[in-house]
Amino acid sequence: MGKNTIVEKYNKYASYESKRWQDLAAQNVNSWPDVWEKSVEQYSHRPIVYEVGSTYPWSYQELDRAADKIAEWAISLNQQYIGVHQNNSAIFLATVLGLAKAGVVAVLFNIRESAQKLSTLAQNSGIKIAIGKPIPSVETYDPNLILERPWSGQISAKHRCQVTLDDPVVIIFTSGTSGRSKPALFSHRRMIGAGIAWSLRTGMSSDSKCYITLPLYHGNGLAVAFSSCVEAGACAVVRDRFSVRAFLSDVRTYNCDSVVYIGELWRYLNQSLKQPDDAKNPLRVIFGNGLTAPLWEQVIERFGIEKVVEHYGATEMPASALTNWTGKAGYCGFIPPDHPDASNIVLVDEQLKVVAPGEAGEALLRVPGNIYRGYLDPKLDENKVWRNLFEPGDLWWRSGDLLCRDTEGFFTFVERMGDSFRWKGENVSCVEVEEAILLTGKVREVVVYGVPIPGESGKVGMASILPIECLEEGETLNDFLGHLQELLPPYGIPHIIRLVEQHHKTTSTMKIIKAHLQAEGFKQIEKYPHFILHQGRYVRLTSDFFSALESGTLTLGFR
């Protein structure tokens, strides 16, 4: 695609989106359920959700009636926020839509979290009632029992008459780029906008089927993929969780022409045994984030993909995500340098000076209307913004991520800056992992950080530990691991630990210095005892294991 063609396409997309928002305003659309109900009117008897393994899909009308039952139940409880703790399913989607119809904000809980973490998150968020799987200390209802009730008719929009586009439709827990998990607000405007943006860039139509195997309690699965289906009148094919073995079989069985991804999904698939018919599948377009340039090229060739739409975004960001739909591999976004949109994102160094093209800098996004609401707790918002940066009264959102922009307007993601890292598609808070390790009662001091390993995207969790007593390979270490499994989800448990005999170096304010630890990684196995999480147990990192890890042939984790 030539440069002029790319710019023309960008302008075409921008023009379409502007016109679409004007039409929605003319129709008095004030919430995502308004958009949903218009799609129900237009596509009433067409399929909206296939659950993998089921014979028949849910139609738009059937899902809408299920949502009405959830809404009627929610209205009777008179709650502003209700927790949702469910696996990927049509009922999950009916629940979120139903709560939105009732003017209630759905607080989405990660089903992989430990019971203790769930209870803490619910308490900190003021959640007293939830729907789905049990959450300790929260009154939890079974959605199946609610859906057995007779349908009383469509819920009146009066129940959400006070809702505006800028109010949250869901709350998603995220560590962002620093600190412990925080409930982040995801607005009706962004949910609708995501559907418009990705259905447009992927070319999704009412005949499309989108395979969703990412969690619906995260933004990619719900906003990027399902909201696009709602916008286009398409059908979502939902699987409970990702499976390498079942992936192509599902895609072929349900004739899916698109799939939402994170980079790890394609890395797993590309590492699987090649088959001569890998490219014989109905997939036309894949969309998501985290697909690096080398993997990008390998994936489209092996699996016969026509188009990739890569993006950069964050749950708590105040504006639209960056997108790259141009076919240029390895880039996460594109904005023509002379387009007005280009001035809404700047990359700055540590002195808040704008960096030159080709240099990495923290991405700052202009906050529309100079009002930022990113978290349930408004006190957290101030830590994410810079005020009066370039002119009096301006407001910029801090991404906490390093990006690079070239002279043509293409963006690449460099790395995260904050006290967290990304592993297996999940944000891992170093603070939370450190707190969990200390709770085992076996550790005097710990510092957690992410380190890169060959053959994997993101960073794996590593912990440098000063134990109270000797932690030895075998029963002692795996007793320690058992404690961590009660406190942390699998992706949060450190996959590499090293044991030290002295306190870690600190700054003058007693903060442990991490930079040199991250730089050392797991290479000092002769100096410190190192252990890796391999096939569900902590085992000594020997020179043979080290060589396998360095060559990318050793798999860490629980399998």
Image: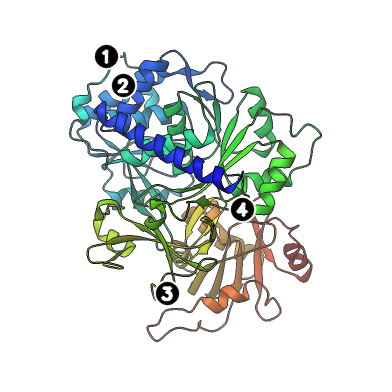
Q: Which residue is mark 1?
A: 152
Q: Which residue is mark 4?
A: 330
> Which quadrant would residue 71 be assigned to in this image?
top left
> Which quadrant would residue 69 be assigned to in this image?
top left
Dot label at residue 350: 3
Q: Which residue is mark 2?
A: 69
Q: Are marks 3 and 1 in contact (CB under 8 Å)?
A: no
- Mark 2 / mark 4, whichever is N-terminal: 2
Say which residue appears at 70% left-offset and 68% top-offset. Answer: 541
Near-viewer residue (364 or 378)? 364
Q: Quadrant of the N terminus?
A: top right
Disc 3 to disc 2, C-alpha distance: 52 Å
- Mark 1 / mark 4, whichever is N-terminal: 1
Q: Amino acid at mark 4?
A: Gly
| Disc 3, SS | loop
- Mark 2 / mark 1, whichever is N-terminal: 2
**Category of crowding for the residue at label 1, using alpha-carbon neighbours closer than 10 angstroms: few (below 14), some (14–19), many (at least 20):** few
Q: Position of residue 158 (x, y in %)?
A: 18, 25
Q: Amino acid at mark 3?
A: Glu
Say which residue appears at 35% left-offset and 37% top-offset. Answer: 18
Say which residue appears at 23% left-offset and 38% top-offset. Answer: 164
